[in-house]
Image: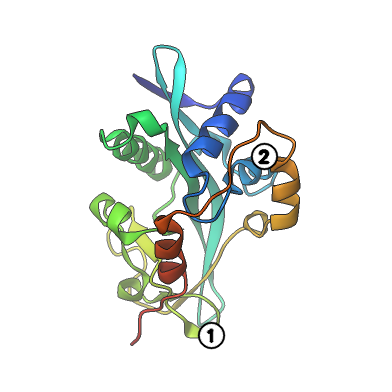
Amino acid sequence: MIIRNEEKKDFEAVEKLTRRAFYNVYVPGCTEHYLIRLMREHEDFIPALDFVLEDEGRIIGNIMYTKATLTDETGFVKNILTFGPVCVALEHQRKGLGKMLMEHSFQAAARLGYDTIVIFGSPAVYVSQGFKSCRKFNVCIEKGIFPAAMMVKELIPGALDGRRWLYQSSPVMAISEDEANAYDDTLEPMEKKYQPSQDEFYIMSHSFVQD
């Protein structure tokens, strides 16, 4: 297996991989494959941190990054990263491959000079990769809210120094669900259906950590 940067020839394979990995996980259907199409053309996308995991010539994993910011109470803006979608082919999951792909990207991000990553996801998945609750780093969203699904990883210990930070993702993340669904309808049909993971996602995405 090798990890390398995504190339234009990989785009279709990565989109198919992403669609299959996320379909019906968080909602009936998914929007992640549409998001990565938009990300690649956006100014906040970081091609140097766009990696694929390849096994005998077949792409079985992918991770992509965009720029994000943290702003402290004085108005100072700190440039940071967020990643996602990140996925591994269904038949290769639970083998540590996602961890390997993420760790490779963390090292590359540090070499580029970034010291902080903020993501939204399941703590059960990401705490083993060194992510902690945003509350522990005093990183919030608007109105001082600390989402339970928002996690932070310092690539350099002490990078956030305890001050209050306001997180802002790239505008590319605010995709239109209608446009995403319209795009999905042009692809090979897949059955949209309910799965228990959708309720788990709803609960986590609507939960907050209190002071």
Is residue 117 visible from the viewing direction of this image? no
Kindly identify the amino acid type of the residue bearing the numbered disc 2.
Arg
Kindly identify the amino acid type of the residue bearing the numbered disc 1.
Lys
Mark nearer the N terminus (2 vs 1): 2
- Count the numbered circles shown: 2
Q: Residue, x 44% and y 54% (percent of image)?
A: 195
Give the side of residue 147 with respect to residue 100, left or right.
right
Q: At which x and y percent is residue 41?
A: 71, 40
Going by the picture, which residue comes out furthest to the top? Answer: 56
Q: At which x and y percent is residue 82?
A: 49, 53
Residue 51 higher or lower than 123, as above or below? above
Q: CA distance from mark 2 to mark 1?
A: 31 Å
Q: At which x and y percent is residue 133?
A: 32, 68
Callout 2: SS: helix
Give the side of residue 188 with respect to residue 28, left or right.
right
Within 10 Å of disc 1 (Cα), the crowding (few <14, some 14-19, many 20+) is few
Q: Which residue is tagged 2?
A: 37
Give the side of residue 84 with respect to residue 42, left or right.
left
Within 10 Å of disc 2 (Cα), the crowding (few <14, some 14-19, many 20+) is some
Q: Nearer the viewer, residue 189 or 104?
A: 189
Q: Residue, x 37% and y 62% (percent of image)?
A: 152
Q: Residue, x 49% and y 53% (percent of image)?
A: 81
Callout 1: SS: helix
Number of the label disc, if any, that sits on residue 143: 1
Image quarter where the N terminus lies is: top left
Q: Nearer the viewer, residue 33 or 42?
A: 33
Q: At which x and y percent is residue 34?
A: 65, 43
Residue 64 higher or lower than 2, as above or below? below
